[in-house]
Amino acid sequence: MYSKKTNLINASGLHARPASEFVALAKTFESKVTVQKLEDETALPANAKSIIKILAQGISVGTLIEIAAEGPDEQEAVEKLFELVESGFGED
């Protein structure tokens, strides 16, 4: 398993459009990919390939998340998703 932590920087959080981008990218990898809201101790890792699971996390700006993957392309999956989050999904 490979994982990285980051804070969500885009002002609107992980709402429908950025969540769709995140899920679409996650689906390009063979590995099992999850995202977890770390500031909520009751939050469980959510399947990053499910838009419903991602939106249910309620991830807003400034939220610390962990992106994790397990499988043959786990490192590439985490790094690419990390880059997407760090880019702010192209939002200002």
Image (cartoon, grey):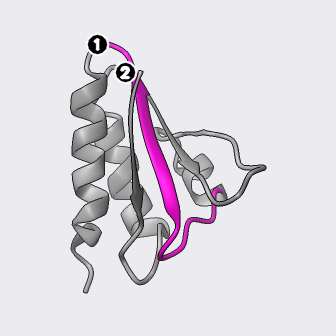
- Residue 69 appears left or right of 58: left
**Mark identifier at residue 26:** none
Give residue 19's quadrant in the image: bottom left
Spot occupied by residue 36 in the image (x, y as percentages of width and height): 57, 47
- Does the magenta run of residues contain 69? yes
Badge 1 amino acid: Pro
Q: Is residue 61 magenta?
A: yes
Q: Which residues are magenta?
A: 57-71
The residues tagged by marks 2 and 1 sit, at their Cα atoms, a distance apart of 6 Å
For disc 2, the neighbor class at 10 Å (few under 14, some 14 to 19, many from 20) is many
Q: Nearer the viewer, residue 26 or 37?
A: 37
Find residue 26 and report its horizontal and vertical position in percent: 35, 39
Q: Quadrant of the N terminus?
A: top left
Q: Is residue 57 above or below residue 68?
A: below
Q: How many marks?
A: 2
Choose the circle earlier in sequence order: 2 or 1. Answer: 2
Residue 27 placed where, x, y %?
35, 34
Q: Residue at (52%, 50%) from the top-left corner? A: 51
Q: Amino acid at mark 2?
A: Ser
Q: Secondary structure at mark 2?
A: loop
Residue lying at the far top in this picture: please name it. Answer: 72
| Vertical comparison of 76 with 43: above or below | above
Q: Are marks 2 and 1 in contact (CB under 8 Å)?
A: yes
Residue drawn at the location 41% of the way across and 28% of the way down: 69
Residue drawn at x 31%, y 60% as measured from the top left: 85
Residue 89, quarter of the rendered image: bottom left
Label of residue 31 in the image: 2
Helix, strand or loop for disc 1: loop
Question: Is residue 9 depicted above or below 77 in this figure?
Answer: below
The residue under label 1 is 72
